[in-house]
Amino acid sequence: MGSGQVTSTSGLFDFQGKHVTVAGLGVSGVPAAKALHARGAVVTVVNDGDDARAREQAAELEALGITVRLGDGSSLPEGTELVVTAPGWQPGKPLFRAAEQAGVPVWGDVELAWRLRGPDAAPWLAVTGTNGKTTTVQMLASILKAAGLRTAAVGNIGVSLLDAVLGEEEYDVLAVELSSYQLHWAPSLRAHSAAVLNLAPDHLDWHGSMEAYARDKGRIYEGNKVACVYNVADKATEDLVREADVEEGCRAIGFTLGAPGPSQLGVVDGILVDRAFVENRQKNAQELAEVSDVHPPAPHNIANALAAAALARAFGVPATAVRDGLRAFRPDAHRIAHVADLDGVAYVDDSKATNTHAAEASLAAYESIVWIAGGLAKGATFDELVAKSAKRLRGAVLIGADRALIRDALARHAPEVPVVDLDRTDTGAMLQAVTEARRLARPGDTVLLAPACASMDMFTNYNQRGDAFAAAVRELGA
C-alpha cells in the first residue's frame, strides 16, 4: 500500500451558472439533473432512448426549466463545462470522447454525491466485488444499526447516493455498494474503509479487459483512512490493496474462511473471530458470532459476513453488535433461498447467480446437486466452473439461449452426469425444468437453480426467473 497523504476533494463545488450536461435519464440521471439545477447550474440532459418512460421523465424535468434532448446521447452540447453520467454509459461513447478532446471532466452520480456532501457528512464504508456486494452491504447496515448507529444501505443497491446525501435524514455512517461502473466515474471518492470481496471476469464488454475491470474495482481503496479489507482466498484483491494510495496509518485487513492470522478475521471451530481490531493481535482474538448466526451459512455467505464485520469493526463497532446484526439479517429473495423440501430433496433458488463466479460459490455450498442452469452467457465460458463442480453433480437440466455452452462443458468435464437439454423458452419451461430435476434427484440431494447466466432471454430479470422456479416447486409439491 502506498502511504502518500490523500487530500479529500469533497469540498463543496460551486455550480452556479455552470453549464452541465447530464448523460442519461433513469434512476441516477433524474436526481442528478434536479440536484444540479437546484444549485444554479444550467442543465442539459441527453438521452439515447426516446420511449414513453423517457418522455415522461423529460416532461418532469422540462417543467423545472431543464433542457432535455431525447434520442441523442452522442454529441456534446455546446458550452458544456462538466458531464455527469449515468454509471452504465460505456467510456468509449462519442459523447465522452468529445468531452475528453474539449478538456471537459466527466463525473458519475457517485462522484457528484461525493462532491455535494457537506463538511460534516457521514463517512462511507464502501463495498465492491464481482459477487456478494448487496448481501454484504445489507449485513453491514444491520450490524451498524445493532450498534445504535444511524445508517442506510445505499448506492448500487437501489437507494440513490444523491438522495441519501441530499435528503433531510441525518446519518452517522453510510453502508455503500459500488459497482465497477460507478467506481470508473468516481475519481475523488475517499472512503473511511472499503472492501473488495472477490474478482472474476464480468462486464468485460464494458471495461474492455480484465485488467481495466480490476483497476476500476481497485479505485475503492484510494484514500482509505482506516482499513482496506481484502479476501485472503483471492490474491487479486490483496494486490489491489498493495497498489492503493491510502492515508497514513490505514491498514490491510484480510478475511478468510480458515483460521485468521494477525490483522485478519476468520473462522475457528464454528466461531467468527477477529484478530485485527484487538489489543495484541499477535496473541489475542475476539469472538464475534457463530457460523449459525449467518443466514444462510453457505461458505460464500460466511465470507460476506466476515467482510461486513471487518468494515464495522474498522468503524469501532463492538463485537456484540456484529453478532446481533448478523442474527437479525435475512438476505434478499433469490439468493440461495430455500424454497421447499419434497420427498427428501431440498429445492434452492439462487437465481441471482447470474455469472460463473456466483454459480461456483452456490454449487460449493451443497454436496449432491441437480443443477438447473442456462440463459444468456454474456461472453462467459463454463469449463472451469464445470470442472470444479463436477463431483457434486447428480444431474443437470439446461435452459435458455446459451445452454449449449454449458452442455458442451459438461460433456468435456463431467461426461457421466445425466443432462436434460430443454429446447423451449415459453412460460411453461421452468415447470418442465423443475419436473425433470425432480426425476433426476434422490433423497438428500439439492435441486439448485444457479443459472450462471443472465435471465433476459426468457425472463424480465433474475427475480422473475426465481419466482418462476419457486412457483414450479410449489406446483409440484401440491
Image (cartoon, rainbow, N blue to C red):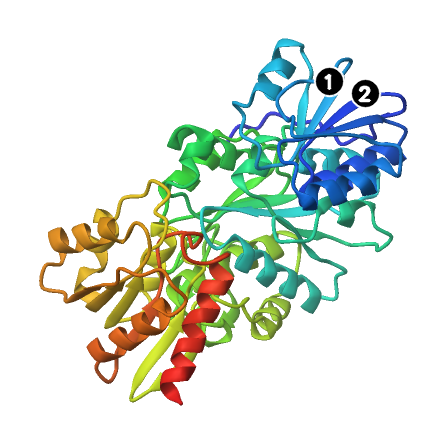
Q: Nearer the viewer, residue 284 or 345?
A: 345
- Residue 231 position, x and y percent, is 42, 49
- Report whether residue 258 is seen: no
- Residue 306 position, x and y percent, is 49, 59
**Residue sitting at x 87%, y 52%:** 168
Label 1 near label 2: C-beta < 8 Å?
yes
Toward the left, the furthest residue is 416
- Residue 251 position, x and y percent, is 55, 42
Numbered mark located on residue 253 in the image:
none
- Tell whether 339 sits left or right of 401: right
Q: Quadrant of residue 360?
A: bottom left
Q: Quadrant of residue 119?
A: top right
Question: Which amino acid type is shown beneath numbered disc 2?
Answer: His
Provide the residue designation for mark 2.
Answer: 19
Q: Secondary structure at mark 2?
A: strand
Quadrant containing the C terminus is bottom left
Provide the residue designation for mark 1.
Answer: 77
Q: Secondary structure at mark 1?
A: loop
